[in-house]
Amino acid sequence: MPEDPIAQSELAALTRRFEETSAQDSREFGIIKSDLTAVRLQVGNLDQKVENLSGHVTQRLDGLERKINGFIDEQRTVNATMVELLSSLVGKSTDSQ
């Protein structure tokens, strides 16, 4: 059976196209894989920053809570003192000196 030169030429062209496409796909896959690695690193960095920020916010809120509690305690003391002073003035004339 003699070889068909047209079929051989077509087969060679198809093989070349397949190899070129395969090489291009490999390059594109490599680029995508590299981009994915970069994205993973960025996500990891963002996770770490969020974690650090969360810790900082928690510390600030804890400090604020302590200050508010201190203020409330101080206000209760002032209120109690005011009640004592006002109670001692009940029934006293404002005209007396």
Image: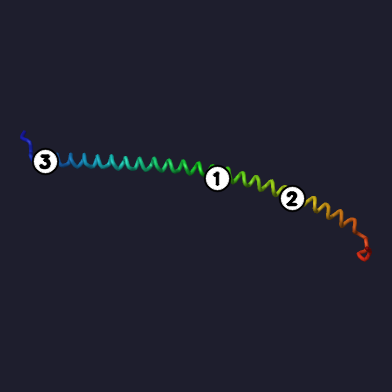
Q: Residue furthest top?
A: 1
Image quadrant of residue 56?
A: top right
Q: Which residue lies furthest to the front in this view?
A: 97
Quadrant (top left, top right, bottom left, bottom right) of the C terminus: bottom right
* SS for callout 2: helix
As shown in the figure, which amino acid type bears the numbered disc 2? Answer: Ile
Left or right of 74? Residue 31 is left
Of the image marks 2 and 1, the number of the one nearer the N terminus: 1
Left or right of 89? Residue 16 is left
Of the image marks 3 and 2, the number of the one nearer the N terminus: 3
Q: Residue at x 39, y 42 (%)?
A: 38
Q: Are marks 2 and 1 in contact (CB under 8 Å)?
A: no
* SS for callout 1: helix
Q: Which residue lies furthest to the left in this view?
A: 2
Residue at numbered disc 2: 72
Q: Residues within 10 Å of mark 1 (few under 14, many from 20)?
A: few
Q: Residues within 10 Å of mark 3 (few under 14, many from 20)?
A: few
Residue at numbered disc 1: 53
Q: Which residue is drawn at 50% across and 41% down?
A: 48
As shown in the figure, which amino acid type bears the numbered disc 3? Answer: Ser
x and y percentages locating residue 75 in the rendered image: 77, 52
* SS for callout 3: helix
As shown in the figure, which amino acid type bears the numbered disc 1? Answer: Leu
x and y percentages locating residue 74 in the rendered image: 76, 50
Numbered label attached to residue 9: 3
Left or right of 27? Residue 88 is right
Q: How much space separates mark 3 and mark 2, taking CA atoms?
A: 92 Å
x and y percentages locating residue 16 in the rendered image: 18, 40
Q: Which residue is drawn at 32% across and 42% down?
A: 31
61 lies above or below 2:
below
Quadrant (top left, top right, bottom left, bottom right) of the N terminus: top left
Image quadrant of residue 96?
A: bottom right
